[in-house]
Image (cartoon, helix red, strand yellow):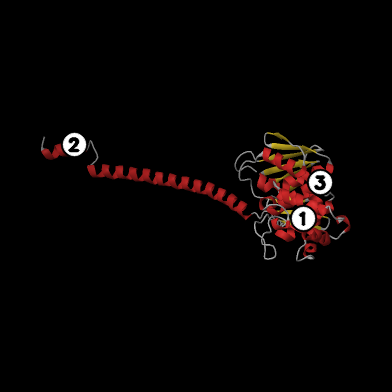
Amino acid sequence: MPTDVRDRVFSLGRAPAGRGNRQAAARRRRRARGLVALGVSLAVAVGGIYAAYGFLDQGQTLVRERCTAVVGTEEHELDPEQAANAALIAAVSVRRGMPARAATIGIATAFQESKLRNIDYGDRAGPDSRGLFQQRPSQGWGTQAQVMDPLYAADRFYEELVKFDYTALPVTEAAQKVQRSAYPLAYADHEPEGRAYASALTGNSPAALNCVLRRSTGPGDPQAVADDLHAAFGVDAAVRGGTVTVSADKTLGWAVAQWAVANAGNRQVTAVGNAGLLWNRAEDGWVPASTTDGSVVITLAGTEGEG
């Protein structure tokens, strides 16, 4: 068979080399485009999830943490650190069997002296002043370490306050008898917020304190909460799993419940139940609930990020 005829017959059985290469290249391009499209889809999905979490985190960052006491027509706001210190001052007055008036004087005094912060410095008039009440070791208030302990400082303040008939005195005069300040009239400026927080934190105004907080940053320590309650109020608490329960009558129950709300930020508290109401961290307030009268139940975050 002539060579040109053999070549034509052989060529009928396979595609020319150039066409095969082009088809293979086209298939590779299609696969590559498919992989790119899949990669883009996955990136969009991951980006969407990341954006959603970022949005939630940003939303938490934008939450302005605050605690508000509303009593009658008065409404006063503190940050969580200040509220926790006010709660301690009120709790000590309850443990000592003092009326709410004592807590009003104590909270107003600490607000004037330190803005309700446990500061470790004084001023020109009292360079060694320290703590919530700016008590001076050089004036016999205790050692520097003692006056920097808020529990000790509150007890020492009330030890001096009971030496006077403070219930018959204006707040600023009662405070001045204890503090002997260079600005004796300044305490009156903080009487309204002192009265509102004292009424809530001594349990005389139920569900009057609310804190708006970000999500919990980790698990709480129930035993630490129970220890704090015993130190502040002198009450015993039962610890079961992630809850702390205190048996208390109406007034003491509300004092304990609102103490727990005021300390929710630093103790990772997610809920507080008492007398048919529940403070829920996620809902930023008190809501009706099936809770038992005479029993305050404090729930803490159990896993990181919960609440």
Which residue is at 41% across, 46% downward? 36
Which corner quadrant of the image does residue 243 belong to?
top right
Which corner quadrant of the image does residue 69 belong to?
bottom right
Q: Pointer 1 and pointer 2: residues touching (CB < 8 Å)? A: no
Provide residue 15's location: percent of width, then percent of height: 24, 40
What residue type is disc 2 on? Phe
Front residue of this view, candidates 12 and 236 = 236
**Where does label 3 land, which residue?**
96
Q: State which quarter of the image contains the C terminus.
A: top right
Q: Earlier in the sequence, mark 1 or mark 2?
A: 2
**Is residue 179 in view from this perspective?**
yes
Q: Pointer 1 and pointer 3: residues touching (CB < 8 Å)? A: no
Tell me if residue 83 comes above or below residue 269 in the rendering: below
| Element on which disc 3 rests | loop
Q: CA–CA distance between discs 3 and 2?
A: 111 Å
Q: Residue 107 got which mark? A: 1
Q: Earlier in the sequence, mark 3 or mark 2?
A: 2
Which residue is at 23% across, 37% downward? 14
What residue type is disc 3 on? Arg
Give the number of the mark in front: 1 or 3: 3
Q: CA–CA distance between discs 1 and 2?
A: 105 Å
Which residue is at 30% across, 44% downward? 25
**Is residue 288 in view from this perspective?**
no
Which residue is at 81% across, 62% downward? 172
Q: Is residue 36 left or right of residue 193?
A: left
**Where does label 2 land, which residue?**
10
Provide residue 117's location: percent of width, then percent of height: 68, 56
| Element on which disc 2 rests | helix
What residue type is disc 1 on? Ile
Provide residue 112's location: percent of width, then percent of height: 74, 61
Give the number of the mark in front: 1 or 2: 1
